């Protein structure tokens, strides 16, 4: 399974996956994980100035309803092409809906985990029944 984690340059987890400057990509299987690459998120640099709610997704109504703004969410699908799963603390509604449409599963990172290494270990050790596919995060 190819798994992505939204991270900052220092490998800490970004609370809102849509605003992550990078995604670390791992191949996970059984009880192990191999880091494949880290990809930049071009969307992080394109966030409109009126939409800086990195802890939630409460963009101003005129921005949130703008088709161009919604299209920006598809950048995540482009850079995560080939991934099966994204480990997240939070996804905004637009991003969650798009991930559901393309079959990209999500797995909730527990609030006590703050770095990439612990997040991937937790995912490997955890039961896959904790998948939040289709549920609001």
Image: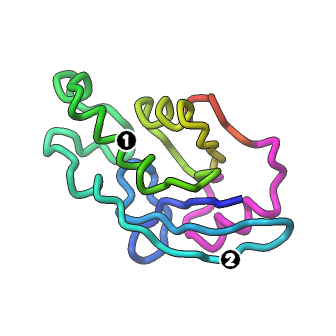
Q: Give the side of residue 73 with respect to residue 23, left or right.
A: left
Q: Nearer the viewer, residue 77 or 24?
A: 77
The circle drawn on residue 108 is none
**Residue at the extreme left of the image, as rendered:** 49
Which image quadrant for residue 125? bottom right
Residue 62: where, in percent of width, then height?
A: 16, 23
Q: Quadrant of the N terminus?
A: bottom right
Q: Secondary structure at mark 2?
A: strand
Residue 69: where, in percent of width, then height?
A: 24, 34
Q: Which residue is mark 1?
A: 74
79 is within the stretch colored magenta = no
Q: Secondary structure at mark 1?
A: helix
Residue 111: where, in percent of width, then height?
A: 60, 52
Q: Nearer the viewer, residue 61 or 24?
A: 24
Q: Using a 10 Å C-alpha cutoff, classify the residue at mark 2 as few (fewer than 14 neighbours), some (14 to 19) or many (20 or more).
A: few
Q: Quadrant of the C terminus?
A: top right
**Up/down of 115 relative to 69, above or below:** below
Q: Give the side of residue 64 with respect to residue 102, left or right.
A: left
Question: Residue shown at 72%/73% (left/top)?
Answer: 33
Mark 1 and mark 2 lie on one chain; the one further toward the N terminus is 2
Q: Give the side of residue 101 with respect to residue 63, left or right.
A: right
Question: Residue shown at 39%/58% (left/top)?
Answer: 20
Q: Which residue is mark 2?
A: 34
Magenta-highlighted residues: 109-130
Q: How far apart are the two marked residues, 1 and 2, measured between alpha carbons? A: 26 Å
**Up/down of 93 relative to 51, above or below:** above
Which image quadrant for residue 115? bottom right
Q: Nearer the viewer, residue 15 or 47?
A: 47
Question: Residue shown at 22%/57% (left/top)?
Answer: 45
């Amino acid at each position: 399974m190819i798994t992505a984690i939204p991270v900052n340059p220092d490998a800490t987890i970004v609370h809102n996956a849509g605003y992550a400057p990078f995604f670390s990509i791992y191949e996970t299987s059984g009880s192990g994980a191999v880091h494949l690459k880290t990809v930049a998120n071009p969307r992080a640099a394109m966030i409109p100035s009126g939409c800086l709610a990195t802890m939630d997704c409460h963009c101003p109504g005129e921005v949130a309803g703008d088709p161009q703004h919604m299209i920006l969410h598809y950048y995540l699908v482009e850079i995560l092409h080939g991934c099966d799963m994204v480990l997240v603390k939070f996804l905004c509604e637009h991003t969650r809906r798009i991930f559901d449409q393309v079959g990209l599963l999500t797995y909730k990172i527990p609030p006590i985990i703050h770095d990439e290494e612990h997040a991937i270990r937790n995912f490997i050790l955890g039961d896959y029944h904790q998948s939040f596919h289709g549920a609001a995060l």
